[in-house]
Image (cartoon, grey):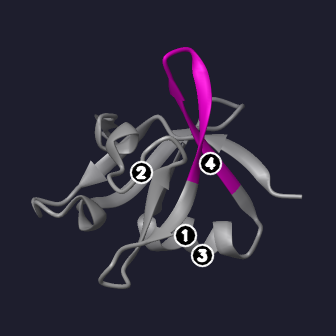
Amino acid sequence: MPSSHEIKCINKSDRMNPHERITAIGGVNPNGTAWKLTQEEAIAGIEKGNWKFFVKAQNRSVDVVVAVSRFRHKYLKTVADDEQPNNLLSLYECRY
């Protein structure tokens, strides 16, 4: 069973394409230490069944999934977002 983790921050590139903008995600472990993964590491962990990620949006948890763009690029997005990963792109920048 995959372990579940809340994404609290992201790092973005300066690319305008929303499917290529997220470079890393981050959060806080139960013991208070910070964690950070590249988007590629997060996608691999989801696809292997090791991790599950979510974000808090409007007082509810929204799952993060792996999607594939029309150009065949894998990227992270929330279930609530159709084609654009807006819930993720609106998170704060990771400072760690």
How far apart in space, not on screen, are marks 2 and 3 (Cα)? 21 Å
Q: Is residue 53 magenta?
A: yes
Main SS, magenta region, reads strand
Residue at image position (29%, 35%) is 90
Find numbered disc 2 in the image and state the secondary structure of the residue it sits on.
Answer: loop
Q: Which mark is residue 44?
A: 3
User: Residue under circle 1?
Assistant: 43
Q: Amino acid at mark 3?
A: Ala
Q: Which quarter shows the C terminus?
A: top left
Question: Disc 2 vs disc 4: which is toward the camera?
Answer: 2
Q: Earlier in the sequence, mark 1 or mark 4?
A: 1
Callout 2, which amino acid? Asp
Q: CA distance from mark 1 to mark 4?
A: 10 Å
Residue at figure coordinates x 49%, y 67% from the top left: 67
66 drawn magenta: no
Say which mark, if any, is on residue 82: 2
CA separation, marks 1 and 2? Answer: 18 Å
Which residue in the structure is indicated by mark 4? 53
Q: Residues within 10 Å of mark 1 (few under 14, many from 20)?
A: many
